Image (tube, rainbow, N blue to C red):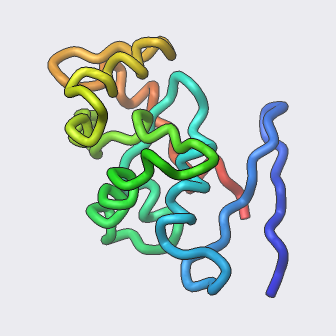
Amino acid sequence: MPAKKTIATNNTRLKAVMPSGQKDLDFSEQVYDIARQIPKGRVTSYGAIAKCIGTGKSARLVGWAMSACSKVKPKVPAHRVVNSAGILSGKLAFKTPTYMEELLAKEGVVVKNDKVKDFKKRFWDPSNELLF
């Protein structure tokens, strides 16, 4: 089995993620590996993560994995994962209904009416950013 590679992009070291189907990582671990690489001030979607790990129709499963990541180590920045329209659909999984928005605001992401403003500009596509 080939080893994982570390990719350098824009002076940032990104950890490549094993494609789905590999036995050394389960689905949730793959999701968390990708989510940990979302840069501060950027967001991605559940579907983009699913597509990146080769399970494009499993955005809902990515959502379930993200809702269960609060005790995972190292920490997973779940606040940076939103739905495909930029809506904070996972906000109820946080300790308060406004905590997700508060964390994004600390990173300079503006949210209005539970939606990321300038979503297209802030969107980070792991399939394009993480090269295998």
Q: Considering the image in quadrants, where does the C terminus appear?
A: bottom right
Name the residue: 40% across, 13% down.
Answer: 105
Name the residue: 39% across, 52% down.
Answer: 66
Could you tell whether 51 is left or right of 8 in the image? Answer: left
Pick out the residue farthest to the left: 113
**Placement of 81 over or under 7, stated as above or below:** above
Name the residue: 50% across, 29% down.
Answer: 42
x and y percentages locating residue 58 in the rendered image: 33, 69
x and y percentages locating residue 25 in the rendered image: 61, 75
In which quadrant of the rendered view does residue 39 lie? top right
Name the residue: 79% across, 33% down.
Answer: 10
Q: Nearer the viewer, residue 54 or 25?
A: 25
In which quadrant of the rendered view does residue 123 lie? top left
Could you tell whether 52 is left or right of 70 in the image? Answer: right
Q: Nearer the viewer, residue 69 or 109?
A: 69
**Placement of 42 over or under 50, stated as above or below:** above
Q: Considering the image in quadrants, where does the N terminus appear?
A: bottom right
x and y percentages locating residue 60 in the rendered image: 26, 62
In which quadrant of the rendered view does residue 98 lie? top left
Count of numbered badges drawn on the protein: 0
